[in-house]
Image (spheres, rainbow, N blue to C red):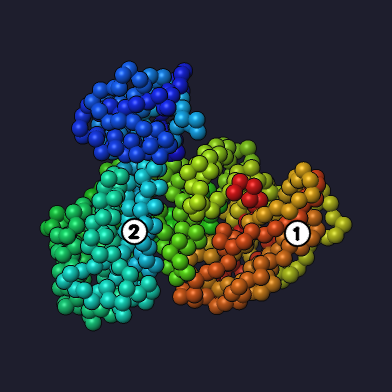
Amino acid sequence: MPLPQHLERKFGVFELKSCRAIVVQDDLFIPEAKFLQIALKSQGIEVKIGKLPVDGSPYILLAKDGMLDAEFKDEAYRLTVSPDKITIKGLHKKGVFYGIQTLKQLISVDKKVLSCEVVDWPAFSWRGYMVDVGRNFQSLALLKQQIDVMAAYKLNIFHFHATEDIAWRLESKQYPQLTAPETMLRNKGDFYTVAQMKELIAYCKERHITLVPEIDMPGHSEAFKRAMKTEMQSDTGLMIVKNLIREFIKTYNLPYLHIGADEVKITNANFLPEVTKLIEQLGKKVIGWEPGGNFTESTIRQLWMEGATKVSKNKNIQYIDSRHLYLNHMDPLESVVTIFNRKISNLDKGDANALGGVICNWPDRNVQKQEDALIQNPVYPAMLAFSERSWRGGGIPGWMAKIGQPGSTDAMGFSEFENRLMQHKQRYFSGLPFPYTTQADVTWKLIGPFANGGDLTASFEPEAATVNLDSLPVAMEVRGGTIILRHWWTPQVTGVLDKPQENTTWYAYRKIWADADESKDFWIGFNNMSRSYASNSPEKGTWDNRKSNVHVNGVLIDPPAWKQAGLSGNMEIPLIDEGYEFRAATKIALKQGWNEVLIKLPIASFKGADWKNPQKWMFTFVALDAL
C-alpha cells in the first residue's frame, strides 16, 4: 500500500536471512542504503553496505535507472526480486527510497520476499498531510511518529500550520514576545525553537518529505495582535510581518511559505501583494487558501471549500486539493470510505496545474492530551486511504460517503482495499491509534421512509413486538459499519439516500450470527462530532438529539452514561467520550444463532440547532472483531 501501478508476480523466493550486503555502486544512494540497513536490522537481518556482493550470497542492489517507461519519472522506481538478487532502481534518490518502502512491505513474517517485478510512480506529485499545531501543540516525538508513517506510505508534503489565534508556535529571535506564555491561550509556553524546527525539517528531508510551513496572515492572527499590540494589516503590523518573513526565510532553507489568508476581511489591499512580492523576491513560492485573499496568479492555491472551477480554468494557476479532506469533519469509518472514493481535483492524475492534494487535521477543539489529536481524528486510517488514492490516482466522480450497493464494482473495489488496510493495521500499527475495523462485508436493509410529522418518538411497523422483520418491504440494501443517510454538506457530499426528506423515520435492519451465547464489543454512534464545531454533548439517557435507538433481539440497548451529558458546546472543554472511537465499546449479549439488529433513525428538520450543531443523519453499528 499504495498499490503499485504495475506488479507482476514471478516464480521463486528471495531468502532475506541469507542476504549479507546492500550493494551501492553510486554513492548518491548511500543515505537510502542506510535507511534500508536500519529497517532490516529491526527485523533481525544484519547486512553490510558496499560496492560488491559478499561471498556470492544473495544481495540487494540500489542503482540508477532512467525510468523511461514510467510517468512522473522523478519519483518512479523499478523493483525486481529474484531468488539471488533484489534490485531497486530509480532516476533519483526519492524513487529508490519509495522502492525501499515497497520492499519493506513485501517481506513476509518468515523473512522471505516473493519474486516479482514492480514498475511504479505516483499519479500526483503533491501528496500531503497537514497538522494544526497552532491550536493544540504537539511534541517533536509525536510529529516524527506521523512523519514516519507518511514516509512509509509515500506521502511527500508535511504541511505545518504553526500560527493561530490560539498561539504563535514559532520562535523568533527578533520578536521573542510572540512566544511568551501570556500571549497563548492553550499549551502556554509551548513553541518550536529554531533548533527544533531545523531538526524537524531535516527529519522530513531525510525521508524525501518537504515541510511546508504555514504562517497565517492576515487572519487567524490574534496571537500576533496580543504579542505585538497591533493588527497585522496596520502599517506597523505589515512592517513586523515582513521582518518575520525575512527572518524565517533566512533561518530555514525551505522552498515554500504558506501564508494562509483565509477567513479574514482584507482591510489593507496592499498587504497580500506586498507580502507575496517579498517572499518571491527571497526566492520562495507562495501558497494560500482558496477561497482566500487577493492573491496574485503566481500564488499556489489550496482549495478548502469551493469548487476548483475558477482556478483550474486558469492555466497560469497551480492548485492543491483539500476540499472534503478535513479529517476533523469525518468519523473513522466514513473517512476511509470517502477518501478512498475521492477523485483528487476531479482528475485521474495530476498535471502542471493540478499538483495533488492534502488531507488536513484541524482539531480546533481543545484536547486533554496531545495524542487525542490522533485518537479523536482518524489520522492513520485516513492517511493510508489517501496514500492509495494520491499515489494510485483514479477514484469516483463526486464526493461520496458510501461504499456502494452490495455486489457493485465500487463495493468490491473498496473491499479489496479494506483487506489490505486491515493487514497493515495488524502488522504495522500495534500500539498506535488506528480507529478502524472491517465494514465492507456489513449489509443493511433499509426500511422506510415513514412520515413522522416531526414527532421523533413516533413508532412504526418495524418496532411492533409481533412483526416479522424479514417480511417487511426493503427500500434498498447498503454496505458499511457507518451509514450516512444525509451528509452535512448535501448535495455536495452524497449519502445513501438520493432524496432524503425531513420529518421522516427510517429503520436499518440486519442479522448477526453467533456460534454460541456470547458478549461482544460494538462501536455504536449516531452523532459524530466535528472537532471544528462547538458541538453539544448528548443529553443524559439519549444517543443523540434525534431520539435514535438500537434494538438487538427486541431489547433496547442503553446509551452510554455520558460524562458530560448535556454540555453546551464549548471549544475549550475537551471531548471525553462523545465519539465511539474514543470511549469504551458497547457490550451486547448475543444468543447462539441469528441475532436481529434494528436501528431507528428519525429526523425532523434538516436544519441544525445552530451552525455549530449541523444535522448529519447517520449511524454506526459494527462489531470490533478485527481490533
Residue 309 visible, this orientation: no
Between 538 and 430, the one nearer to me in the picture: 430
- Picture mark count: 2
Q: Which mark is residue 278?
A: none
Residue drawn at 36 percent across, 21 percent down: 58
Residue drawn at point x = 21 percent, y = 52 percent: 255
To which residue does mark 1 refer?
Answer: 551
Q: Quadrant of the N terminus?
A: top left
Q: CA distance from mark 1 to mark 2?
A: 46 Å
Helix, strand or loop for disc 2: helix
Residue 377 place in picture, x, y as percent: 48, 59
Give the residue furthest to the bottom: 229
Q: Residue at x 62, y 61 (%)?
A: 584
Is 82 drawn above or below residue 439 in the view shown? above
Q: Residues within 10 Å of mark 1 (few under 14, many from 20)?
A: some
Q: Is residue 133 above or below residue 183?
A: above
**Residue type, numbered disc 2:** Leu
Q: Secondary structure at mark 1?
A: strand
- Which residue corresponds to mark 2? 140
Query: Relative to 228, is 405 on the left or the right?
Result: right
